[in-house]
Amino acid sequence: MSDASKDSDTIISSPKDITGIILAGGKSLRYGKNKALVEVGGTRLIERVISVIRPLFENLIIITNTPREYDYLQLPMREDIIKGLGPLGGVYTGLETISDESGFFVACDMPFIQGSLIRYMVEIRDDFDAVVPKIDWKIEPLHAIYTKNCLPAIEKLIDARGYQIIEIFDNIRVRYVKEEEIRSFDSRLKSFLNVNSPRELAYINRLEGE
């Protein structure tokens, strides 16, 4: 069965206590311009992300420090409460500002995210503070579910001038999604590919054509 078929066959009702949160606050220094607005397959990266998560969650927000660039999307936006923290600041802002208890956080430059995998992550979250994909040694903290229970650990990390979200994982209850689980929804592990340079964009456009 193809990944797309699994997406359509895996149907659950929208969770009532989780917000879809798109992180679009990066400066795109390596890319050279706002990569959220570059196109893959004729569609802007951020719009591809939205098209996947919009059917999954009743509430969506964008975390960005350049909200005017995304006005046309007509979605709620929040600027970082503490600027300069990178993705950690986006996760902190999201958890502080949403009314739901949890958020599914995803980077704006991941063109191949799979709705079926995200639904699976929602289903297995139970009482964990975070649900995070892990392939071998590599953790994917920007395609993950975090709850407000993570806030004390995040605040402690910020106070210590730490900037890597994975540094909180020793202090919270994490459900790691293993490679074999991920491959049942995304056989080629494309969900976690992102765009950091024009060269990577060219590679991803080639994948789009396969």
Image: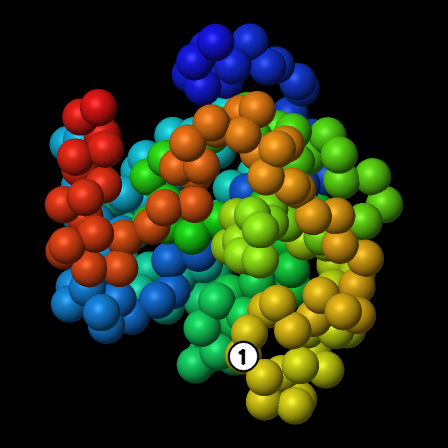
Residue visible at 85% across and 45% down? 127
Inspect the image, locate mark 1, and give the three-letter code of the amino acid beneath it.
Tyr
Farthest bottom residue in view: 160
Tell me if I can see residue 153 in this picture. Answer: yes
Farthest front residue in view: 136
Farthest right residue in view: 127
The percent position of residue 52, horizontal first and vertical second, equals 43, 30
Q: Vertical placement of 41 versus 19: above or below?
A: above
Between 201 and 65, the one nearer to me in the picture: 201
Left or right, 14 with reference to 65:
right
- Image quarter of residue 69: bottom left
Return the residue at label 1: 163
Left or right, 175 with reference to 167:
right
Identify the colour scheme used: rainbow
Between 78 and 148, the one nearer to me in the picture: 148
Q: Residues within 10 Å of mark 1 (few under 14, many from 20)?
A: some
The percent position of residue 203, horizontal first and vertical second, equals 19, 44
Image quarter of the C terminus: top left
Exactly how many numbered labels are in the figure?
A: 1
Residue visible at 48% across and 9% down? 1
Q: Vertical placement of 134 versus 149: above or below?
A: above
Residue visible at 53% across and 25% down? 185
